[in-house]
């Protein structure tokens, strides 16, 4: 050690809070700040220019009817464009907003259970120490590597009603497939299928890392007691996997509110608005219809919805997430 | 017992291969379609394997679009984005984890709180900011925001906190400046986290769509996803061209994956948030 009993004069001990106690301030004077600031400057500049300022400006824009053309902070801008909470009121009153919410929930209700079942199967499969598991791992990961734009183009081609692979494969079994992306009823389910295909390897590997962490001795004890594979799965694996499942739920739910490239490429919000979702609306109001104020208000409503859903899940987790591995 | 084991081995292979087939069929379709002539796209019954394969679609993609330039753009942007981010984030993390300064915990909390804000909330004002800075249609517009990514700071602070202080003290007693301590002691000890982060950051930038779509409208500056989406606009029904473009766009990332598979998987488990 060799240094004074107070530990390092400059560097913090492990586990010690950074400057929690008031007295420590005096020990160092302004020195610590001088040492720290060169390291912090890049991040601080980035935070100020690319996060803090835009957030403040975003709140301001959301209270105006700015069209993106008039100079934002020109004289008289406020008198001319300030409309208070008008945008928020208009959005909440518009049938379109509720349709967008309904579309998003349709997606969530179909996607989350399907994705969970498939990715738990993927994880269970990859947790086996058997021949071929390495190859499976690589193969399942290829859709994850593919960009959403490429994946969307591939699936748009597959789902083409007449000449696409999907309906022609279904025809081999005597099934007449629907119009998929061109059919109001089937467009969102089709997007869900593509998303599950794209995400199963990703969430599968996250759940796998949770499965690998489960103590082997539980399984050995269960086997001695004569528990079958299914019982072991439902009584040991699933309960002990709940922290990973919870994490996957939070991430996938946040992602579900932010669908964008797949919508833009595969349906562009159609047919007849059946796949219009929040980010697609924000993008179009902002950069196609130039209703910047409306789009900004929309994005804050999106933020609040995500916040509420995350908070509800965080509170609900005590009831079903099991943290004693 | 042996009977049961055999059964579950069968189940393992049946399910495993089924999911593998589902994962790969779309790519087989992509390759098959990309090798078709335009007329063969609409033959009934459809040709699962093109009867007269041709590379015409690839030629079209490469002549109508500076695709190799686009690959170069994507590589340049993703690598630079990652490097800027790692430098800036590791410096901040070093300050937060290892230097005493007032209000450090509060500042870190503020930084981390920004992780909750979806990027869509800031795109419109960020567009305004970029416009003011004259950066629209320059690489800077997509590169500069990498200077602050709270998630990277968060991961690196956690890693840096585990570095024993005796290492840092030893170096500074030998007369090394704080920057040398950061550069020569702290950074090398964070190598695993840095490797993991560089993969997630690279992937995020490589596949990013919304922001480059707004910023890079000039054909010669576009990244792969953006170039692909303009192909979608131009050749909406020429699926052979779209599939050829998709395939070309996948080659670089697959090659990178083959060489760095371990880091991809580590990165994903640490990250969880995707582009």
Image: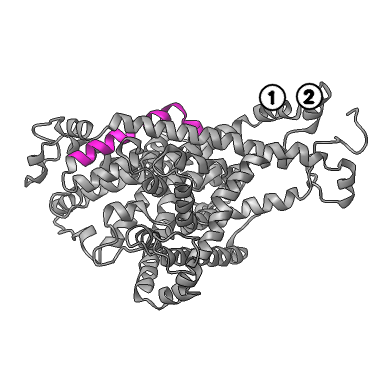
From the viewer's perspective, is residue B41 above or below residue A246? above
The chief SS type of the magenta part is: helix
Q: Secondary structure at mark 2?
A: helix
Residue positioned 46% across, 73% down in the render: A88
Disc 2: host chain: B
| Residue at (34% x, 31% y) in the render | B71
The residue nearer to you, when weighing A206 against A186, is A186
Q: Residues within 10 Å of mark 2 (few under 14, many from 20)?
A: some
The answer to whether B182 appears left or right of A155 in the picture is: right
Q: Residue A192 at x, y = what percent?
A: 34, 57
Residue B22 seen from this side: no
Tag 1 and tag 2, C-beta contact below 8 Å:
yes
**Residue that carries the numbered disc 2 in the rendered image:** B171
Q: Does any portion of residue A177 appear in the rendered image?
A: yes
Which residue range is magenta in the image? B241-263
Query: Is A124 in the magenta?
Result: no
Q: Is A317 situated left or right of A275 in this image?
A: right
Up-down: is A317 above or below B185?
Answer: below
**Would residue A6 appear left or right of B71 to someone viewing this image?**
right
Q: Is residue B247 magenta?
A: yes
Residue on which the image places disc 1 = B184
């Amino acid at each position: 050690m060799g240094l004074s009993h107070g530990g390092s004069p400059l560097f913090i001990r492990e586990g010690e809070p950074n400057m929690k106690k008031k007295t420590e301030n005096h020990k160092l004077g302004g020195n610590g700040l001088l040492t720290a600031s060169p390291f912090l400057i890049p991040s601080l500049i980035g935070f100020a220019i690319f996060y803090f300022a835009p957030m403040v400006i975003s709140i301001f824009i959301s209270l105006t009817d700015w069209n993106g053309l008039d100079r934002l902070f020109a004289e008289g801008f406020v008198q001319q464009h300030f409309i208070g909470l008008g945008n928020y009121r208009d959005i909440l009153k518009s049938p379109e907003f509720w349709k967008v919410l309904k579309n998003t929930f349709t997606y969530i209700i179909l996607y989350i259970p399907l994705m969970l079942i498939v990715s738990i199967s993927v994880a269970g499969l990859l947790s086996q120490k058997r021949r071929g598991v390495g190859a499976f791992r690589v193969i399942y990961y290829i859709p994850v590597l593919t960009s959403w734009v490429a994946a969307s183009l591939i699936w748009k081609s597959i789902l083409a009603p007449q000449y696409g692979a999907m309906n022609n494969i279904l025809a081999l079994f005597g099934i007449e497939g629907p119009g998929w992306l061109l059919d109001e009823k089937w467009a969102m389910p089709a997007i869900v299928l593509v998303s599950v295909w794209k995400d199963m390897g990703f969430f599968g590997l996250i759940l796998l890392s949770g499965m690998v962490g489960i103590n082997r001795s539980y399984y050995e004890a269960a086997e001695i007691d004569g528990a079958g594979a299914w019982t072991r799965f439902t009584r040991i694996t699933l309960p002990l996997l709940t922290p990973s499942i919870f994490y996957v739920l939070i991430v996938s739910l946040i992602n579900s509110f932010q669908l964008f490239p797949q919508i833009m490429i595969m349906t562009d919000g159609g047919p007849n608005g059946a796949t219009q979702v929040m980010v697609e609306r924000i993008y179009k109001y902002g950069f196609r219809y130039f209703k910047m104020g409306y789009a900004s208000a929309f994005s804050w409503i999106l933020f609040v919805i995500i916040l509420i859903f995350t908070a509800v899940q965080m509170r609900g987790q005590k009831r079903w997430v099991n943290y004693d591995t | 017992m042996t009977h049961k084991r055999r059964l579950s081995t069968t189940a393992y292979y049946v399910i495993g291969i089924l999911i593998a087939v589902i994962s790969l069929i779309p790519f087989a379709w992509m390759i098959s379609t990309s090798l078709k002539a335009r007329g063969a796209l609409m033959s009934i019954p459809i040709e699962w394997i093109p009867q007269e394969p041709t590379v015409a679609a690839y030629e079209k993609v490469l002549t109508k679009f500076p695709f190799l330039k686009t690959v170069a753009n994507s590589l340049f942007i993703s690598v630079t984005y990652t490097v800027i981010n790692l430098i800036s984030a590791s410096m901040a993390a070093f300050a937060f984890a290892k230097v005493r300064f007032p209000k450090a915990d509060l500042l870190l909390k503020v930084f981390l709180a920004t992780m909750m804000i979806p990027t869509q909330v800031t795109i419109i004002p960020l567009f305004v900011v970029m416009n003011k800075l004259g950066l629209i249609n320059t690489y800077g517009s997509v590169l500069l925001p990498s200077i602050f990514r709270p998630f990277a700071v968060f991961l690196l602070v956690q890693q840096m906190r585990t570095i024993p202080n005796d290492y840092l003290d030893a170096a500074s007693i030998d007369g090394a400046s704080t920057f040398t301590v950061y550069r020569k002691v702290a950074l090398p000890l964070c190598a695993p986290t840095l490797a993991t982060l560089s993969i997630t950051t690279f992937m995020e930038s490589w596949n990013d769509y919304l922001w480059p779509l707004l910023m890079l409208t000039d054909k010669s500056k576009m990244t792969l996803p953006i170039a692909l989406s303009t192909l979608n606009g131009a050749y909406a029904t020429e699926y052979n061209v779209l599939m050829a473009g998709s395939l070309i766009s996948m080659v670089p990332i697959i090659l990178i994956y083959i060489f760095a598979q371990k880091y991809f998987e580590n990165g994903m488990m640490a990250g969880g948030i995707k582009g």
